[in-house]
Image: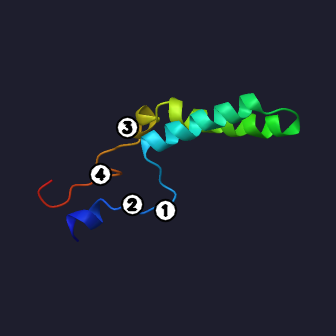
Amino acid sequence: MSRRQFFARVDPNYLEWEEAQKARCKAERDYRAASGQKKLQLMRDWLILSLHTIMPPDRVGIVRKLRLNVSLKRTGDG
């Protein structure tokens, strides 16, 4: 496997961090400019994007799940 293949995006829906922030800002602008029933859907979209781009990922929960010989297994020299 080449270096380029190793770092290639696997998921076609992947967004870079900057693109995600732009999407969040656009969703907020769209929400604030809308009215009526459409405003409710745009608020939902904005809130979902905000939760995924503002809140940090849960690394504490992931670290707590790591256990020797269960989720952490020795392979070779490492």
- Residue behind mark 1: 12
**What residue is rendered at 41% in x and 63% in y?**
10
Q: Nearer the viewer, residue 21 or 78?
A: 21
Residue 21 location, x and y as percent? 51, 36
Q: CA distance from mark 1 to mark 2?
A: 7 Å
Q: Residue furthest front?
A: 33
34 left or right of 29 in image: right
Looking at numbered disc 3 in the image, what kind of residue is underneath it? Val
- Residue behind mark 3: 63
| Image quadrant where residue 31 sits | top right
Figure check: 70 above or below 49: below
Can see residue 47? Answer: no
Looking at numbered disc 2 in the image, what kind of residue is underneath it? Arg
Counting labels gives: 4
Figure check: 16 above or below 35: below
Label 1 vs 3, first from the N-terminus: 1
Residue 60 location, x and y as percent? 42, 32
Q: CA distance from mark 2 to mark 4?
A: 30 Å
- Residue behind mark 4: 69
| Image quadrant where residue 3 sits | bottom left
Q: Nearer the viewer, residue 41 or 63?
A: 41
Residue 44 location, x and y as percent? 73, 37
Within 10 Å of the Cα at label 2, are there few (<14), some (14-19), or many (20+) other Cα atoms?
A: few
Q: Residue furthest bottom?
A: 1
53 left or right of 65 in image: right
Q: CA distance from mark 4 to mark 1?
A: 34 Å
Q: CA distance from mark 1 to mark 3?
A: 28 Å
